[in-house]
């Protein structure tokens, strides 16, 4: 039946085009794309499955109106989504610059659409009137014809303009317009709330995220985890005994990227060994010197949580917990390296860098991973995160783009604004003594914050080997070792861990340089042919996880004493990272508290951790109780999202029900929201603004928005009037005496007549 319908539809389309070709005056052909076309009959229009892009130039052009013919035909009753980016400039040398929303600047003569912002994106259907589009518009057509786009400029004034807007037409869901069930879940794309997710068919709020991956299914501003709620008891003792771990009931708590719910914690834990008790905030007054703690540096008994296989994070009595949404740094291609080499110009010289600023909407728990494509990259193009050395680009000598994944330390990120920099290596430093042709390209840079199984041991560069070679000073003499301790609180039971070390100038004509974990040699630093030029080599050493232990571990790299290289035995190491063999990312949130590892057994008591406000609501319904007030507003304002009757209550006695308080933006439990001494209900009755403390104006006793003799006459007529609290007569009772008296009359005389 499906195939028959497709055949019929194609025949109808061909007949329509043939008919139009015979009767052009009656049926003008308006382009190859029709908004209403649904090729695969899945209930989604083709443009909603795969959108199209059009560039709308502002000039320069001598056309009276520089319009773009889109080739898209729309009919009466059709809907189409427009989204636009970019910027344009009018009269390039001196005129204003604008995005698709337009500018506040006014042209000397009327623009194409006089009442729309100057230089905004505009459109029209056929020969109809132009209308404002701006940055985004869901357009419901009442006409038929081809869609045209333009910049809202003064007709005949495009000759000195520059710039353009990139306009996306259609939703562009990414589904296959030739396959009615893109994700093969048995539900047609048009009826599938998540047509790209074979495990989900619902999208309650229609935001394009299926409920399975949407942290707020009903889009009410409360995370689903908060609406569902729940508690977990963090007992003083538990399993495993050395560091007990506690899970939310019913399958645990699993969070999505960007989901950062509010938690609260109460309770007391006691440690009879030192006669100490603590709340979830921990004991800052107790010394932790020399103690091997679950979270070194954090107070004893402080509540902890971790995300998946990440590291423990200190919490307290109230906290927000979750992890950030991934960020796209750039999808453009950037070229940097040498400045000029035999006429080959590269925009950014060696030693310079490119900046990628970004903002985080949540914390970074566990490791983050930078994914970036590199082209012809050497081994010393470094990555800085907020000014700290965080890694380097992969070495890729081939002139093709290769995807490179670099783990980034969570401790280097910060709340809000962040900066990632990629630095081009320099020839005139000992770190990159390679050829002058060091230019490289990068593109498609993103950071993902899903928990990753990395532990960062040491990132800085360390130089060891000979003590003194002529005038070249090496800090650590040969025959000594580099040691660094690192901390683990959990690890896989079986599997191979991988140690990554960047090594420089380790040649094969010297004895191997041993690498040990907890005093057991697991391998040697990778070596290069001594005939090759010096370079950084990314060593990988695999070893059994049984060599690792919970608590303090040690990494040791030994140098070798002797004159094998004519007394030039120095070498460098950096970027030491451990990858644990967890099979897949785990997004469950688990809890514990900070204590000496292995010393939990004698403690008593518990902490109780609650997610959300403590009041549950329906995560699939933005107004759980159908009282006209959405759940978010009720929770934030102190109402019960499950109580239908509270919408008609007036808890602050200001003569406004809670439903009307929402209408006017006033507070549920404050009878005078703006603090101007006139109650919210009295202001609504007088048609003034109960959220603006300067409305009504001083002395405007009428009120009519004008302070004049009429206000004074009303005051005189009310002389000696007893004034009730929060009544509108408080406008006349300026001295707040409870009555309109001589002092108020004097105030009015002074304010109005002088």
Image (cartoon, rainbow, N blue to C red):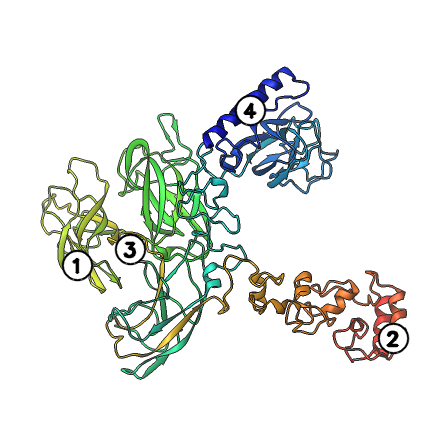
55 on left or right of 335 = right
456 on left or right of 114 = left
Q: Secondary structure at mark 4?
A: helix
Q: Which residue is mark 4?
A: 13
Tell me, yes or no, if residue 184 can be seen here: yes
724 on left or right of 189 = right
Mark nearer the viewer, 1 or 3: 1
- Alpha carbon distance from label 1 to label 3: 19 Å
330 on left or right of 87 = left
Q: Which residue is mark 2?
A: 718
Dot 2: within a 10 Å radius of its alpha carbon, few (fewer than 14), some, or many (20 or more) residues?
Answer: some
Q: Secondary structure at mark 2?
A: loop
- Give the mark, 4 or 1, whose residue is nearer the N terminus: 4
Q: Which residue is mark 3?
A: 456
- Give the mark, 3 or 4, whose residue is nearer the N terminus: 4
Mark nearer the viewer, 3 or 4: 4
Q: Secondary structure at mark 1?
A: helix
Q: Nearer the viewer, residue 670 or 704?
A: 670
Dot 4: within a 10 Å radius of its alpha carbon, few (fewer than 14), some, or many (20 or more) residues?
Answer: few
Residue 340 image position (x, y, % from top left) = 38, 30
- Alpha carbon distance from label 2 to label 4: 79 Å
Residue 509 image position (x, y, % from top left) = 11, 41
Residue 674 image position (x, y, % from top left) = 69, 67
- Give the mark, 1 or 3, whose residue is nearer the N terminus: 3
- Give the mark, 1 or 2, whose residue is nearer the N terminus: 1
Vertical comparison of 295 with 187: above or below: below
Q: Which residue is mark 1?
A: 546
Q: Secondary structure at mark 3?
A: strand
């Amino acid at each position: 039946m499906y195939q028959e319908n497709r055949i019929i539809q194609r025949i109808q389309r061909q007949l329509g085009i043939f008919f139009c070709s015979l009767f052009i005056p009656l049926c003008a052909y308006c382009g190859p794309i029709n908004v209403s076309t649904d090729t695969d009959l899945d209930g989604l229009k083709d443009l909603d499955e795969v959108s199209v892009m059009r560039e709308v130039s502002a000039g320069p052009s001598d056309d009276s109106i520089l319009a773009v013919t889109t080739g898209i035909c729309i009919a009466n009753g059709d809907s189409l989504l427009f989204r636009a980016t970019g910027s344009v400039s009018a009269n390039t040398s001196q005129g204003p610059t604008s995005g698709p929303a337009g500018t506040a600047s006014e042209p000397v003569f009327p623009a194409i659409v006089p009442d729309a912002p100057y230089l905004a994106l505009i459109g029209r259907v056929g020969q109809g009137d132009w209308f404002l589009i701006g940055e985004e518009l869901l357009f419901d057509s009442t006409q038929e014809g081809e869609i045209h786009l333009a910049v809202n400029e003064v007709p005949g004034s495009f000759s000195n303009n520059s710039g353009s807007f990139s306009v996306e037409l259609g939703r562009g869901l990414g589904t296959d317009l030739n396959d009615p069930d893109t994700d093969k879940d048995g539900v047609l794309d048009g009826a599938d709330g998540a047509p790209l997710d074979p495990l989900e068919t619902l999208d309650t709020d229609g935001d394009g995220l299926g409920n399975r991956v949407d942290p707020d299914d009903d889009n009410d501003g409360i995370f689903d985890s908060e609406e569902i709620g729940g508690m977990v008891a963090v007992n003083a003792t538990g399993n495993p005994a050395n560091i007990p771990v506690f899970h939310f009931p019913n399958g645990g708590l699993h969070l999505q990227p960007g989901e950062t719910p509010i938690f609260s914690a109460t309770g007391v834990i006691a440690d009879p060994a030192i006669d100490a008790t603590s709340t979830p905030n921990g004991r800052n007054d107790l010394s932790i010197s020399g103690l091997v703690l679950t979270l070194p540096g954090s107070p004893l008994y402080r509540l902890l949580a971790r995300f998946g296989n990440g590291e423990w994070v200190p919490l307290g009595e109230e906290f927000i917990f979750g992890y950030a949404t991934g960020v796209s740094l750039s999808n453009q291609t950037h070229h940097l390296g040498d400045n000029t080499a035999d006429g080959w110009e590269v925009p950014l010289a060696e030693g310079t860098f490119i900046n990628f600023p970004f903002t985080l909407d949540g914390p970074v728990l566990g490791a983050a991973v930078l994914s970036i494509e590199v082209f012809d990259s050497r081994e010393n193009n470094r990555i800085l995160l907020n000014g700290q050395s965080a890694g380097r680009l992969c070495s890729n000598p081939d002139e093709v783009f290769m995807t490179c994944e670099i783990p980034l330390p969570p401790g280097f990120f910060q709340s809000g604004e962040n900066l990632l920099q990629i630095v081009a290596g320099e020839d005139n430093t000992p770190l990159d003594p390679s050829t002058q042709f060091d230019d490289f390209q990068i593109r498609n840079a993103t950071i993902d914050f899903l928990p990753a199984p990395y532990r960062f041991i040491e990132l800085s560069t360390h130089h060891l080997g000979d003590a003194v070679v002529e005038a070249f000073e090496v800090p650590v003499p040969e025959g000594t070792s580099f040691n660094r301790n690192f901390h683990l609180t959990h690890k896989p039971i079986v599997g191979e861990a991988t140690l990554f070390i960047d090594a420089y100038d380790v040649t094969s004509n010297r004895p191997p340089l041993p690498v040990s974990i907890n005093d057991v040699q697991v391998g040697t630093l990778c070596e290069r042919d001594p005939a090759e030029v010096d370079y950084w080599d990314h060593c990988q050493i695999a070893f059994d996880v049984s060599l690792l232990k919970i608590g303090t571990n040690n990494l040791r790299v030994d140098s070798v004493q002797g004159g094998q290289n004519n007394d030039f035995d120095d070498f460098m190491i950096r970027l030491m990272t451990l990858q644990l063999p967890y099979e897949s990312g785990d997004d469950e949130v688990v809890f514990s508290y900070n204590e000496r590892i292995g010393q939990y057994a004698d403690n008593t008591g518990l902490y109780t951790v609650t997610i959300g406000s403590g009041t549950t609501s329906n995560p699939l319904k933005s107004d759980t109780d159908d009282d006209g007030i959405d759940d978010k507003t009720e929770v934030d304002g102190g109402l019960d999202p499950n109580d239908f009757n509270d919408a008609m209550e007036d808890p602050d006695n200001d003569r406004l029900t809670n439903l009307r308080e929402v209408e006017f933006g006033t507070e549920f439990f404050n009878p005078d929201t703006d603090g101007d001494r006139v109650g919210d209900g009295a202001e609504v009755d007088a048609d003034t603004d109960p959220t603006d403390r300067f409305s009504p104006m001083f002395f405007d006793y009428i009120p009519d928005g004008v302070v004049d003799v009429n206000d004074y006459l009303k005051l005189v007529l009310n002389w000696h009037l007893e004034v009730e609290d929060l009544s509108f007569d408080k406008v006349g009772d300026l001295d707040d005496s409870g009555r309109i008296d001589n002092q108020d009359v004097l105030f009015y005389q002074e304010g109005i007549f002088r």
